[in-house]
């Protein structure tokens, strides 16, 4: 059974890697205007995190490809290999 989540429920959720590193907090999603599918999550990086501080930040936000998202529940879990 597919679970649907409303976008505003995601705002502010903590984003962590599958091996436990804190990335930051979800801010917005980049959606394809043609297909309506999510291309990427935009994340406000946690600059106190040694992992997040090493990632490329564009306009104050990290762009996490949607393909790297593994789970969405209390946290958004992403595959570390796909965001580095």
Image: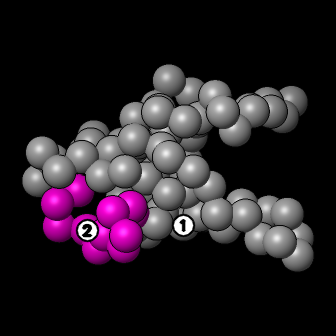
Tell whether 72 sits left or right of 74: right
Crowd tier of the residue under label 1, counting other residues whose Cα lies within 10 Å: few below 14, some 14–19, many 20 or above: some
Residue at left 59%, top 35%? Answer: 10
The image quadrant of residue 40 is bottom right
Majority secondary structure of magenta residues: loop
Residue at left 50%, top 57%? Answer: 42
Q: Secondary structure at mark 2?
A: loop
Whole-number angstrom distance, CA of label 2 to CA of label 1 = 13 Å
Tell whether 35 sits left or right of 28: right
The image quadrant of residue 24 is top left
- In this figure, which colouring scheme has been used for the structure? one colour
Residue at left 48%, top 63%? Answer: 64
| Residue 40 in the image: above or below residue 18 | below
Crowd tier of the residue under label 2, counting other residues whose Cα lies within 10 Å: few below 14, some 14–19, many 20 or above: some
Image marks 2 and 1: residues in contact by CB distance under 8 Å: no
User: Considering the image in quadrants, where does the N terminus appear?
Assistant: top right
The image quadrant of residue 59 is bottom left
Residue at left 23%, top 56%? Answer: 52
| Residue 75 in the image: above or below residue 62 | above
Query: Circle 1 is placed at which residue position?
Result: 65
User: Considering the image in quadrants, where does the C terminus appear?
Assistant: bottom left
What is the residue that sits farthest to the front in this orientation?
59
Looking at marks 2 and 1 on the same chain, the residue that comes earlier in the sequence is marked by 2
Q: Is residue 10 visible?
A: yes
Query: Circle 2 is placed at which residue position?
Result: 55
Report x, y in % for residue 69.
55, 52
Circle number at residue 32: none
Report x, y in % for residue 67.
60, 64
Q: Secondary structure at mark 1?
A: strand
Part of the protein shown in magenta: 51-62
């Amino acid at each position: 059974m597919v679970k649907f989540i409303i976008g505003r429920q995601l705002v502010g959720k903590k984003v962590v890697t599958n091996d436990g590193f804190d990335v930051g907090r979800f801010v917005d999603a980049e959606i394809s205007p043609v297909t309506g599918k999510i291309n990427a999550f935009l994340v406000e990086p946690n600059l106190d995190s040694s992992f997040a501080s090493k990632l490329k930040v564009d306009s104050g936000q990290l762009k996490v490809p949607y393909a790297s998202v593994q789970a969405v529940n209390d946290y958004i879990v992403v595959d570390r290999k796909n965001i580095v």
